Image (tube, rainbow, N blue to C red):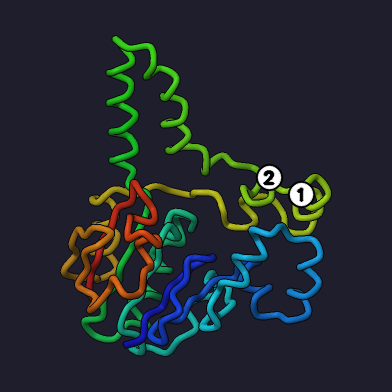
Amino acid sequence: MKILNLGCSSKTSDSIDVINIDWSLKLLLKQNFLLKTLSYFILSKERKDKIKNLPNNIMVYDLSKGIPFEDNSVDVVYHSHLLEHIDRDKVTNFLFEVKRVLKPNGIHRIVVPDFFLLCSNYIKNFELSMNDEKYKKMGDNLIADILEQSVRKEAYGTSIQKPLIRFTENIFLGDARKRGETHQWMYDKFNLECILKEVGFKEIKDKSFNSSEIYNWDKYKLDIDDYQNEYKSGSLYIESRK
């Protein structure tokens, strides 16, 4: 079994079946001994721990250049909260790349923020706010769940650092969009299904964080946390086959 975990950031699997691929700073520091050594003098303990805990089965690669694998060579392609970060006019090309590297009948598992659920939560809270003051204060947070990451200017991880580190990271790494952190589009089950059909995927099915047609999926722990709970709440899970 060969599984690609695309755009993984620090949510990786240490299974020998999985190749974790991203070009995030954490993975770069994990792979480069010199940079990792120098960075340890300025990184927070939390960041150091995240890098230390990353497995060795990682590949630092810019996925905007394609997926660096041969045609029909991979059993599963998985990506979580990645698709919404890709420019809308480039999503189809990305999905064609996924299809290219998958073996015939290989599985493509997508996890994205569920736009329908996010909007439903906002509407329910809005209706409750008509008669109960306590819900009015919650409304802005629910709007943020939908829009904040589309309008974010500064990368979140940088925004919570000490002033000098924050200044340095903004200068050398750029803003949130340059680092691929902002949302470029949102998805529900229907527009995602339409795009997958357009690319030629078949057997498109709704799944949950703990259900999959991927054999023994739970052992990879990519959609669950250390307590077996959903890792990314409010997500939409879609699987399809080549």
Query: In the displayed structure, does residue 233 sit left or right of residue 181?
Result: left
For the residue pair 130 and 151, the one nearer the viewer reads as: 130
Give the residue at x 64% y 51%. Answer: 157
* Residue 129 pos. (x, y %): 33, 15
Query: In the displayed structure, does residue 215 sit left or right of residue 223?
Result: left
* Residue 99 pos. (x, y %): 33, 77
Give the residue at x 38% y 67%. Answer: 222
Asked if residue 103 is positioned above or below residue 212 in the image, the reply reads: below
In terms of secondary structure, where does tag 2 sit? helix
Give the residue at x 62% y 72%. Answer: 52
For the residue pair 98 and 228, the one nearer the viewer reads as: 228
**Mark 2 to mark 1 CA distance (whole Å):** 6 Å
Q: Earlier in the sequence, mark 2 or mark 1?
A: 2
Query: In the displayed structure, does residue 50 sit left or right of residue 204?
Result: right
* Residue 242 pos. (x, y %): 24, 77
* Cβ atoms at labels 2 and 1 below 8 Å apart: yes
Residue 6 tag number: none
Residue 166 tag number: 1
* Residue type at numbered disc 1: Arg
Asked if residue 239 is positioned above or below residue 162 in the image, the reply reads: below
Asked if residue 35 is positioned above or below residue 69 in the image, the reply reads: above
Tell me if mark 2 has few (under 14), some (14-19) or many (20+) residues whose alpha carbon lies within 10 angstroms of its own.
some
For the residue pair 142 and 47, the one nearer the viewer reads as: 47
Residue at the spot of label 2: 159
- Numbered disc total: 2
* Residue type at numbered disc 2: Ser
Question: Split into 4 quadrants, where in the image is the N terminus?
Answer: bottom left
